[in-house]
Amino acid sequence: MTKQQKQIHLAAHFPGVNNTTVWSDPEAGSHIEFSSFVKLAQTAERAKFDFFFLAEGLRLREQGGLIYDLDVVGRPDTFTVLAALAAVTSRLGLAGTINSTFNEPFEVARQFASLDHLSEGRAAWNVVTSWDAFTGENFRRGGFLPQDQRYSRAETFMRTAWELFDSWRADDLVADKATGQFLRGEPGRFEHHDEHFDIAGQFPVPRSPQGRPVIIQAGDSEEGREFAAATADAIFTRHGTLEAGQAFYSDVKGRLAKYGREHSQLIVLPAATFVLGDTDAEAHERADVVRRQQVSGQTAIKFLEQLWNADLSGFDPDGPLPAFDPVAGENTIAKGRASVRMYRDPLATARQWRELAEAKNLSIRELIIEVTGRQNFIGSPATVAGQINDFVQADASDGFILVPHVTPGGLDEFADKVVPLLQERGVFRTDYTGPTLRDHLGLTTPASPA
Amino acid sequence: MTRGTGPRLAVALDGAGWHPAAWRSEDARPTEVFKAGYWLDLVREAEAGTLDFVTFRDSLALPSDGVRGRLDAVLTAARVAPLTSGIGLVPEIVATHTEPFHLSKAIATLDYVSTGRGGVQVSVSSSPEEYRNFGRREFGEDISGEAADYIEVLRRLWDSWEDDAEIRDVATGRFIDREKLHYIDFEGRFFKVRGPSITPRPPQGQPLVTASSGVADSSVDVVYVTPQSREEIGALVEAQHGRQVFADLVVFLDETSQAAADRRARLDSLALLESDALVFTGTPAELAELLLAWHVAGLDGFRLRPAALPHDLTAITRGLVPELRSRGAFRKSYEAPTLRGLLGLDRPANRYVA
Ligand SMILES: Cc1cc2nc3c(=O)[nH]c(=O)nc-3n(C[C@H](O)[C@H](O)[C@H](O)COP(=O)(O)O)c2cc1C
């Protein structure tokens, strides 16, 4: 007996503020005009994707004390642009990354409940926990939160937001013109006191179509995984190989039982990039071109500086690696990016890079092209459809959040050529079966409190 | 110039209208207040009347009467933006409990999604409920001057990117010219904000900033005042030297003044209307006369608060507007693509450009 094929979930990530996004391509359009957001969202909806996804960063990144200028810079306000996209799409889920450190539960719950009403049940919240004082300089509260408290704040933030979402029953809105009764009793009452929040009152938004937005978690640490297992509907991750994906998948799914949750209640969605071609060979040629666009000589030096934790602006990107070792201690060169913490052992990483560069006779730029972010899926539409399906069926993920490298047309080819092949295999929907994002993801809608 | 010499006209939207019993009117749609289609219908109606802008009322607490519930005003405005094309969209925000950094990019984004029709009404918190919902400050604390600081931060952040900061220079690999991005380094009594914004300068440069008189008068483009008679107007306008002054009026409009008065009496028997603004009951023609007279007395425009929706909004767009047009005192079509343009305001120079 063959195992039943899993259905794949797909989301479209608006190209982001990082070097994956190729702004130098002649096809690359605006990253800020609303028309670009409309274009990508409508392509995703045409292809029957589960949702549209927006990342967030609340301070412009810096390197060496200067605003980082090599990547796309500038993005809209997450809530506002998603509310506007609700007007030009009708089924597509709308997922926004919103930080739990520089916001308040009352405000964020009100915004998500509003978005869920205004989109008729399509809102999702990607909870992130950036805490740093650098970002805090843009906010009233400054950098108030120690790193080790960010998940404790996130957890209680989330619990508090849930109390607010659940503070109205589905039938609390009566609006009986004859009797003048507007509400059934006094819904919305809440009270929450703990080390992070001290609030009480009445929530002003009636229960929204999804009860509460879909919760996505993005964060890789032990605490992050535990947080996801306890509270999230989906987890946004990065994966390299099939094996790494499988290990992550079984790890986080294995944590669910402890919280009385089933496998299907946490959907694992890694980010994935792709390059298509008519043939596999053509796709690989294109992928090489894209890699060179993503890693200019200037970008290669900046990447190297992030590992070396030093100013390397005098180095030639077409020349060899520095002969000296990375500067030990706290990484101070790059601010406002999560990736610097990937290099947990800079000396060891530098040693590996140097060995690789020597073995293959690579320049700085060639090395960086080799060691950072290769595209996940490269090939003809049939090859890519096969790879994606293999990943999902092998339990390395439940689907992908696809990150096109060109704005806003970078998903067109995938929508036109790969999606139909997945549909033919019977592993991807040919139409939406329900109106809400929870329907698309196969998640139940939380029951209204009695 | 099709606007002639008449007043500018805005409408304030809130729930089912400004009378707390408005939701019990026959044509009211009180449960649809939580659906996008309701707001879209109202804003499209206002746009059909070529009004300058609509405001979306908001607060950070549950309304204590009328329609008891509310969606976020910025998101509601954004939701209708792509489906409208001429009218200005001005949501209310509460400065006291929110982050100016978040709201600056939110209003900038509203300006992007409406291609230059965004604005904001800044208000301050006067209810202990709002303080308790946030739990970060004490009700009764001295907040004078905070709204002005807040607006200063909104404005500096909008200017923190020069218009031509994005260069896409392949030779040097640079997407932006960082010399054209600016730290705002605001430090005031209530907060510090470093900047720059994460959102590039919005289409209007500076979206329209409005507020009720007394909130932050010298910081705004449009001030809302509440004269009770024509005699008060001269002094009110003079006090605002140079800013545009709009009078708020609650309006009950019907074919006869008797019908309007009867309708008000009916609603008043169901709930008490407490209003800071003058309440007008009468015909669209009578209102047109009053507006023209008050305009001559010095007001730039009016923000009408329909007592009941959609009734009094429709009476504005289909009754009042034709009355004004027939007197050559109101536009027949939108003559400018941006809200600032409709109000005769230039796109301002960037304060950080040397
Ligand atoms: C796939 C992925 C995407 C992320 N996207 C964002 C983002 O858009 N904005 C943000 O502020 N942080 C983002 N983060 C950062 C996380 O929220 C978190 O702050 C960071 O990963 C550190 O948490 P950790 O130690 O649990 O990994 C992302 C993390 C991951 C793994």
Image (tube, coloured by chain):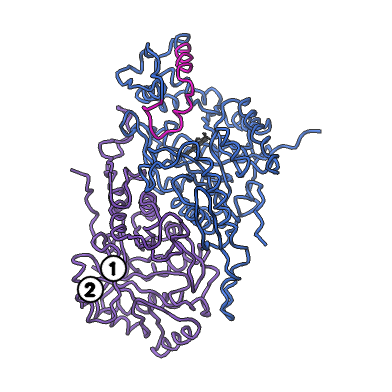
- What residue is shown with label 2? B236
Q: Position of residue B252 (x, y in %)?
A: 40, 81
Q: Amino acid at mark 2?
A: Leu
Q: Position of residue A316 (x, y in %)?
A: 33, 16
Q: Are marks 2 and 1 in contact (CB under 8 Å)?
A: yes
Residue name at image x 65 percent, y 60 percent: A449
Closest to the observer, B298 or A104: A104
Magenta range is A330-356
Classify A215 as above or below A60: below
The chain letter corresponding to purple is B
Residue B213's disc is: 1
Question: Which quadrant holds the N terminus of chain A?
Answer: top right
Residue name at image x 40 percent, y 14 percent: A325
Q: Chain of mark 2?
A: B
Whichever of callouts 2 and 1 sits on the residue coming sooner in the sequence is: 1
Classify B305 as above or below B143: below
Q: Relative to residue B322, is residue A276 drawn left or right?
A: right
Closest to the observer, A45 or A76: A76
Classify A276 as above or below B194: above
